[in-house]
Amino acid sequence: MNKYSSLKRVVFVGMAVWLQQCLAAEEPRPQVPVSIGRGYYAILPNKLLLASQLQPEWKDAKLEWTQQSGPGVVKIERPSAAITWATADQPGKYVFQLKAAVAGRDPFTDTTEVNVYPPGSYRGNPILPGMFPDPHVMFDEGRFYIYATSMENDAGSYGRASVWMSDDFVNWKMELTNYPEYGKFGGDIWAPDIIRKGNRYFQFITRSGGYDTWVAVADSPTGPWKNLREDNTPIVSGGGNAGRIVAAYNMDAQPFIDDDGQAYMYWGWSESMAAKLAPDLKNIDGDVHFLKGTKWLPSGGALPQWLSVDLGKSTPISRIVSSPEFRHVAYGYMLEVSRDGRNWDLFADRSANRTELPGDDGYVDDGRATGRYVRISFNHCGGNWAGLYDFAVYAGDKLVSLHKPVTASSVRGKGSEPENAVDNSTGPALADFVEGSYMIKQNGKYYLLYSSGVLHDGTYSVRYAMADHPFGPFITPPNHIILKMNEEQTTRGPGHNSVLKFGGDHYIVYHQHNQPHEGGAQVFRQTCADLLEFNPDGTIKPVTPTQTGVGPLQPAPPQPTDLARGSYAIATSVKSGYYVPEYAFDNNNASLWRAADNSYPQSLTVDLGAVRDFSEIQTTFEYPTLSYKYQIDVSEDGSTWKTHTDKHAEFPVAVSPHRDAGKARARFVRITITACQRPENGAGLYSFQIF
């Protein structure tokens, strides 16, 4: 007998399917794709939902849910309903089929699968509700803290500073913080990073749109914060022709304190930079170290831009390797060779390239030519700017361009001279660096973790390099990509991590694209956590991204029973089958109910199945850093209602979850949301829990 067969029968919900109809060119025919991204799951005895939503033309369809495969027999409670719960007592992967039939149309069938995991005290990934990318984790005096960028609408607008707190790493609560000063920053910050030094806490942030790094100080992890620098200026900024440190590079700062007490700062976008900090952390102490090597940068983003090297004499040329500024951008360019600097012959033409990326090794172009001058001309940079870490010209196996005279169409400033492109300074490490620096130290070795690829798609990933000194030189170990999209795409676009060292273990806290993986810009990201391990030789093992997460790291008081979990519900409107109301009752931070649009009021009513006694209701809204006006009413029969909570007159302080205490006896509980602090947002709930 399977060891889970004695479990109380459990209910789980599978990935949602909703029905659409499209018009073909010749005649109307149904087209009903799966409307939910891969990634929903169940942790026994939690519940998951089989859900579909029908287009009006299919509202009279006869539906049938059936189990196609799985390790156990599943009982589907309402197989002919659009939304139904199912029960199983064994973990594993299950596949379900939905068949829809309506008179006069061909029947439709589609399948959906769901992973079901053994019982555990973990809640799963993501560990936080809402969109909180760029997470930084800290443990201090018995409590875990997470600070992150916050997102507050469908346009991807960045929002208020906040802090998440937990005693066990499973049950989290959120409060707003007072930093930054909204009059100066407009409330939009990126990638907060906190460090404790002595009895004070220092917060490093990027001001969105400003691309500069600010530092605040407080006597508590939750603030109140004040600017560390008395003149209210950033610790580092850039812009214009400010040499190599251009404005867009100054982001994602991470402070790091070494064993000897020396503080460092690692930061940058595309450019990987590091510097010592003064003892009071107010200023950079000494030079800025560029960890990727030297490079040439033009004065701006205008195109075309060119760079030409003089080999000194006519030379046979067989290969040219171009290592441009960005490794995640497709470049269009031409390579030409000249004997006299006036008449040019084509060596390679990639001017039409819009898809091929340079990768870690740069662009490699082979050919046969003879000349003294070699020129690269950029005509496309994927919305960015031209620039070269290395421009290497070979005659057979011999590098013939090293330290040769070089000219360029323009130069940004000091530190970005064209000579930098022919000094062969670009090593194998950090060539693929994009953003999200995070330094850790283990057994005397320095590990710089960072993100690479494109934030908006599945190429985004976490990588690392190793060194014996905080400034390097760094080496790239084998298998240096340690966290990436998995084959099933239950994890997609993971990156911008921090690391928690706790109880002798390491945990990587990162963001990934939200579920479902809908189309579009894919800037919506949620916070996840998994185990980070080292090999005996000191290298880092590739991380296995999980749906279960790491579970509790400290004991916590027993949690009360959520009476609403796994219940059926109705709502005034639903955006799509991705967001049916039952997703507010599946104990999963990856799923939520969303109303069809931003009109108000909107309500959700849950049926507890019987009259129950309870004393508290906890509500987690779609955007936790925003305030919502709402009212909660209760009823024993669904007809006569009493008010339990009334917060519709004024916006309450934004927290998560909202805890509304009050003894009540009811079968039906209804929340009516009347407004959001940002009116462009519709109503939405990650969870509506009744205790």
Image (cartoon, rainbow, N blue to C red):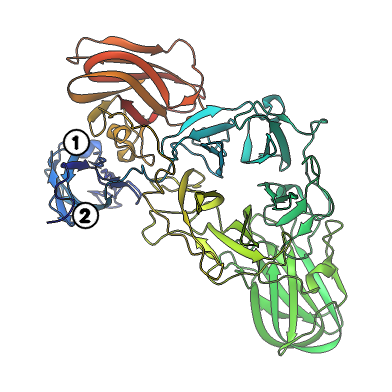
Badge 1 local density, few (<14 within 10 Å), some, or many (20+)? few
- Label 1: which secondary element: loop
Residue type highlighted by circle 1: Lys
For disc 1, the marked residue is 59
In the image, 133 versus 373, the foreground residue is: 133
Q: Is residue 80 above or below residue 615?
A: below
- How far apart are labels 1 and 2 at the CA level? 25 Å
Badge 2 local density, few (<14 within 10 Å), some, or many (20+)? some
Q: Determine whether, in the image, residue 101 is placed left or right of residue 344.
A: left
Residues at badges 1 and 2 in contact (C-beta under 8 Å)? no
**Number of callouts in the render?**
2
Residue 291 visible, this orientation: yes
Residue type highlighted by circle 2: Val
Q: In this view, does 441 lie above or below 686?
A: below
For disc 2, the marked residue is 95
> Residue 271 at x, y = what percent?
71, 57
Q: In which quarter of the image is the C terminus?
A: top left
Q: Is residue 374 above or below residue 89?
A: below
Q: Determine whether, in the image, residue 632 is placed left or right of residue 276.
A: left
